[in-house]
Image (cartoon, rainbow, N blue to C red):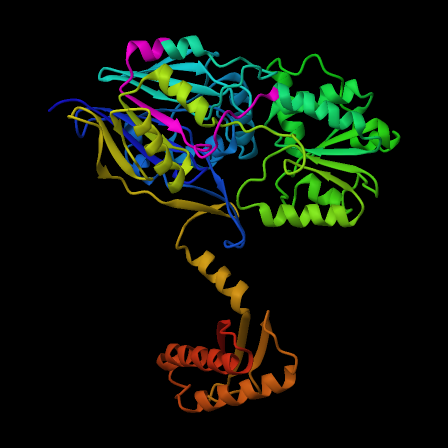
Amino acid sequence: MKDELLFCPLGGAGEIGANMNLYAYGKPGEHKWIMVDIGVTFADDSLPGIDLIYPDPGFIVEKKEDLLGIVITHAHEDHIGAISHLWPKLKCKIYATPFTAVLIKEKFKEKHIDINNYLKIVELNGIIELGPFKIEYVAMTHSILEPNGLKIQTPAGVIMHTGDWKIDENPMVGKNIDIKRLQRIGDEGVLAMICDSTNIFSVGRSGSEETVRKSLLKIMGRLKKRIIMTSFASNVARMESIFYCAEKTGRQISLVGRSMHRIFKAARQCGYLKDIIEPIDPREAKNISREKIIYLCTGSQGEPMGAMMRISSYTHPDVFIEKGDAVIFSSKIIPGNEKKLYKLHNQLVKDGIEVISEENEFVHVSGHPNRDEMKDMYNWIKPKCVIPVHGEHRHLMEHINFAKEMQVPYPVLVENGDIVKIFPGKKPEVYDKAPSGRLYLDGSISVDEDSQSIKDRKNLSANGYLEVTILITPKGNIHNSPIASFRGLPIYEKEEFIYGLEDEIEKTTRSFNISNKKQEHNLIDALKIVCRKFTKEKTGKRPFTNINLVRI
């Protein structure tokens, strides 16, 4: 039996977010595994009460004895967000560069887990050896500090895992993309490249952080009023640009929102953001005249608990906004967030506040590569096989077409759970399927996609709730009237509804022998059906119904 080299995405293939990739090497049945990234995605309004979604790691949990480690490319939530939730099931070593490691430690601290013995800090451009895998961290540029591609060397050949990247020749903070190293890796020969697909539909180049800085300086220079700026907290280069513009325009700067402070602190701890003005506390900022202050806030996507939303609804304790002020959204409108963001923009405009966003000014560049940058990467790496990840199905399909245009011999289209045999064989191909799926964080508990708690909540949110309590005497008669209560039903004639419901309940109960305890379950089922039917006739809703039989 020959040794095999396998790749299997459990998350991030067919979706943007929730990245989790597995690599395996060895004889069938004796594979050694590594995991690259362990991220989350965020729930929308269709899942009431759910905030975080992450890949189901069940497939690799079964093989955890052979899992050599989790290798993290960078610190965005869609690459590290699930780590403290899922690591207890895996209990293996974690490898990350210094800035990413600081943020990972924070996540475990919140869960009261001491991760120090398992978290291994890798120097920038460092190399780690895990069994048959020799992994080299390669400096990339992206919209966060310390993004890395991974050169994964195995006895079968080299895999280039790009992680999230772009080509920014002047990223302002952190290292430049290591083009020379990427070219050398390509010259040495690459079996397969696993590559970011986010901006595959965007022509040209994504642009540099330096040009955003110049544009922001121009915009802030003409504004003679209070400025409230919001951007992705994780984008430290943007944060530094805003500090720089504040200083150049003679303004003080104040950070607002937990993750803004967290990222600022982590960046400082790792030796970044050294030559900037000191931010001031939002409580002190109240005393500074409005043309001399800029607030940098969380909530650029209209998140309900983000600082920006609280400021715009006048519920923030420290930051006040008034007519004539300006709000700058220095971020992309992420697909799916348009509705809540436009609602926020409309509210601000209605209140006489100037709104500046990517729609009317140049205030943001993407952290992912456009097509011309992709061409460069393909020309440097010259892979025999390309496996697109980090995209929805339409992105992945377009990336396959692009790989064909770039004359890559073996582009392979995958979705979550596909197991690709990269070596041996005439060509890399999907040859098996691993169980895959999603877990939802429901409160502090991980639940499956078809969990009863979620079904019940969806039902409650759509149909309301009805509860009926019936008291039964020792002789098996109903004592007094049934007690009914309801929530979320469009009922205005409350007494009339309850009288009608009582009649239906009594009619049904009379047809059962209540003194026979074995009949109880049948009676409860019959009453549920009757109550829901009656409510449907009166309101058009079939409520989530609960029947209590109480013997007195």
Q: What x and y, as percent, mark residue 386?
A: 31, 26
Q: As displayed, is residue 376 above or below residue 113?
A: above
Please tell me whether residue 74 is drawn above or below residue 41 in the rendered image. above
Would you say residue 203 sits in the magenta stretch?
Answer: yes
What range is drawn magenta here? 184-209
**Magenta includes 118?**
no
The answer to whether residue 277 is above or below residue 324 is above
Q: Nearer the viewer, residue 84 or 377?
A: 377
Q: Which residue is found at the position 42% from the left and 24% from the top? A: 374
Quadrant location of residue 185? top left
Position of residue 353 measured from the top left corner of the image (x, y, whole percent): 78, 42
Number of dots carrying numbers: 0
Q: Camera-side residue: 105 or 382?
A: 382
Residue 264 image-quadrant placement: top right
Residue 542 appears at what percent x and percent y?
A: 49, 74
Which quarter of the image is occupied by the N terminus?
top left
211 left or right, relative to 315: left
- Residue 362 relative to residue 388: left or right: right
Quadrant assignment, res 385: top left
Q: Which residue corresponds to the image point at 49% horizontal and 28% vertical from the top-left?
A: 368
Residue at 48% from the left image edge and 40% from the top image edge: 41
* Residue 182: % across, % down: 39, 13
Q: Is residue 290 left or right of residue 202?
A: right
* Point 78% across, 29% down: residue: 294
Residue 22 seen: no
Q: Using the image as rendered, state which of residue 515 and residue 274 is in the foreground.
A: 274
From this viewpoint, is residue 75 visible?
A: yes
